[in-house]
Image (cartoon, rainbow, N blue to C red):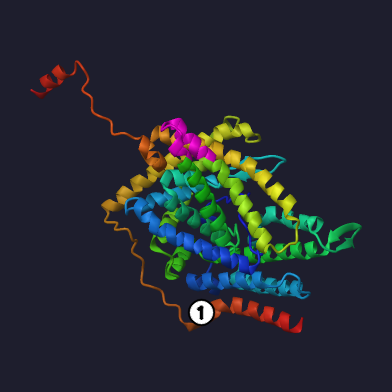
Amino acid sequence: MGAGHGGGLAAAYVPGDSPVHRLEPHTKLVAVLTFALVVVATPVHAGWAPLAYAGFLLLLLTVAGVARVRPGRLLRGLVVEVPFVLFAVLLPFVSRGPRTDVLGLSLSESGLAAGGSILAKATLSVLAATLLAATTDARGLLRGLERLRLPTVLVQILSFMIRYTDVVGGELRRMQVARESRGFRGRHLGALKVLGPAAGSLFIRSYERGERVHLAMLSRGYTGRLPSGPVAVAGGRAWATALSLPLAAVAVLAGGSLLG
Amino acid sequence: MHVPDGFLDATTSTGTAAVAAAGVALALRGSRHELDERTAPMAGLTAVFVFAVQMMNFPVAFGTSGHLMGGALAAVLVGPWTAVLCLTVVLMVQALVFADGGLTALGTNVTLLGLVAIGVGYGVFRGLRAVLPATRTGLLTSAGVGAFLSVPTAALVFVGLFGLGGVADVALGPVTAAMVGVHLLIGLGEAVITVAVLGAVFTVRPDLVRGGRHLLRARELAPRPGLAGATAVDAR
């Protein structure tokens, strides 16, 4: 269902030199993941939940301001959640439980709360991930995941994926241009007859390119591990800066449950 | 089909994350038979390919569209364990770089699109391959049925998870019907594309289809009649 990830992996990154850009990638990964966990852990049916969501949003906007990520970039990141917005809007109509009247429509109270919370939580976490992607390039993400002890095989697959997505994506786009300039319109099921073989030849082209590149790498002494630079050390201050986002979120959550 | 954050409660997300971690650990062990140092880059390219075809949307019905999940296809192409690793990496990139699929829901997505879809797709494929005749048609049929069934099964497991830890109090009956109905159609698309891709790859490079290795026979070098004399002359 996802909307197209146009523009390849590099399009997500916004080059910059803000304090957020300079943070070590693994500290940012931990920070964003913890933040998402805190957001998801917010109770759905608590009366103060909307206030907490607003607090989280304020935190994210502050980070975006520090990182100089434009609002337009954040909004574009939100496109992926469109299918789920539809689902969230439907929830108040189909949920069970006591009903309430809003503008003459009979809506389920729990459905309203659930739909609203799904929308808020998904939006907040998409914004957090968008901020991460906007301030960390793909190579940095890879380095961060490596530091966080992701198994070597996965790191290898990921590094090849990062390097070849643009190449294969370009191939895909050329095939698409070729199809459409011959009058192809993918509007009905018959389109599959065209798209299937296209995907088949895409696979063969990707794979054979991979074979060639791999042979070239082997002949240049590839041993199965790419040499990486010296391991970057993140000191206490760097961690403190990175974790200030999730810690502030925890504070918002704690404040809500104490006062609410 | 990518589950975002906040859809399932924290307990269910943690549970599926544990399941996914265990599955990926198993796949890391299992893939040692499928991947040697030579094929690790190939796994990377397979991941890129799955990522690319997930961008190809095909129309389903009522204006909605679906895209390939690619689990069954990848499993037949590179083996089930490697396929799990590829799908895991694809989902990770989609969550981290494109925010498609929630970060805390990563475990759920790996469980559904990686473990369940590949388990069902490859299981059905192996089962059918054993009973169908060992031909190209038999291979493609088994893969097609496997791919078809993998999609609604994953949808069904999602509805189950939603019933366990969904944040909304919805009657599960209609949700199940809608989800399975739509995903039967998406499954048809998945099957058609899987068969088309496998057919194309099997025609051009049969050695790349791991699930079809049993169909490859070492060709004997047959001397062509009438050429023996010519070779003798050339050799002189």
Q: Please tell me in which quadrant of the rendered image residue B208 appears.
A: top left
User: Residue B41: x, y in percent?
Assistant: 38, 52
Image coords of residue A235 (percent x, y): 46, 81
Label 1: few (<14), some or many (≥20) within 10 Å? Answer: some
Mark 1, chain letter?
A: A
Instruction: Give the main secondary structure, helix, strand or loop, of the magenta stretch.
Output: helix
Magenta-span inclusion, residue A75: no
According to the picture, the residue beneath numbered tag 1 turns out to be A239
Q: Residue at x 52, y 38 (%)?
A: B144
Q: How many marks?
A: 1
Q: Is residue B129 magenta?
A: yes
Which one is nearer the viewer's eye here, B142 or B54? B142
Looking at the rendering, the stretch of residues picked out in magenta corresponds to: B128-145
Give above or below for A47 relative to A183: below
Q: What secondary structure is marked by label 1?
A: helix
Q: Quadrant of the C terminus of chain B?
A: top left
Q: Residue at x 51, y 46 (%)?
A: B121
Tell me what residue is drawn at x 29 percent, y 56 percent: A222
- Tell me the quarter of the picture where residue A149 sits: bottom left
User: Closer to the camera, A24 or B94?
Assistant: B94
Is B154 placed left or right of B34 in the picture?
Answer: right
State the image coordinates of residue B139 (x, y, percent, origin top left). Answer: 45, 35
Task: Kindly tell me whether residue A80 is visible in this rendering.
Answer: no
Comparing A210 with B155, the one in front is B155
- Which amino acid, mark 1? Trp
Q: Is residue B138 visible in the rendered structure shown here? A: yes
Determine the residue located farthest toward the front in the rendered image: B131
Residue pictured at 88% horizontal, 63% vertical: A100
